[in-house]
Image (spheres, grey):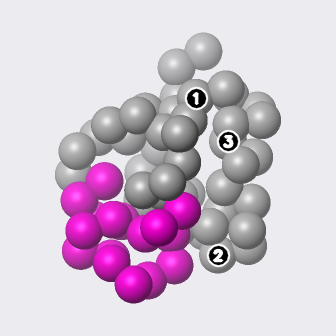
Amino acid sequence: MIVVCDSSMLITLSLVDQLLLLADIFGGVLIPPGVYEEVVRIGAGRVGAEEVRNASFIQV
């Protein structure tokens, strides 16, 4: 199954330390470049930025 996430889901799950739920349920997640930009680059230092950057199951 292919799953595409937006920034809200990534940030919210990171906030409650449950980002790995996506990997457990779906195996892998695709995110558009704009979502990566928003969460990791623009959101540097905020909740979710490092978690998404380091998540091996997330592909841009």
Q: Is residue 41 left or right of residue 25?
A: left
Give the camera-side residue of 60 and 7: 60
Please report contact status of discs 2 and 3: CB closer than 8 Å, yes or no. no
Q: Is residue 15 left or right of residue 39?
A: right
Circle 3 sits in a helix, a strand or a loop, which is it?
helix
| Residue topped by disc 2 | 15
The residue lying at 33 percent from left, 65 percent from top is 40
Place of residue 27 in the rendered image (x, y in percent of width and height, measured from the top left): 67, 26
| Residue topped by disc 1 | 28
Q: Is residue 45 magenta?
A: yes
Q: Is residue 39 left or right of residue 47?
A: left
Q: Is residue 4 magenta?
A: no
Assign the C terminus to one quadrant of the image: top left
Magenta segment range? 35-51
Place of residue 31 in the rendered image (x, y in percent of width and height, measured from the top left): 38, 40
Please name the amino acid that badge 2 sits on. Answer: Leu
Between disc 1 and disc 3, whose residue precedes?
A: 3
Circle 2 sits in a helix, a strand or a loop, which is it?
helix
Please name the amino acid that badge 3 sits on. Answer: Leu
Q: Main secondary structure of the magenta part?
A: helix
In the rendered structure, find residue 22 and report the number of the disc placed on it. 3
Q: Residues within 10 Å of mark 1 (few under 14, many from 20)?
A: some
Circle 1 sits in a helix, a strand or a loop, which is it?
loop
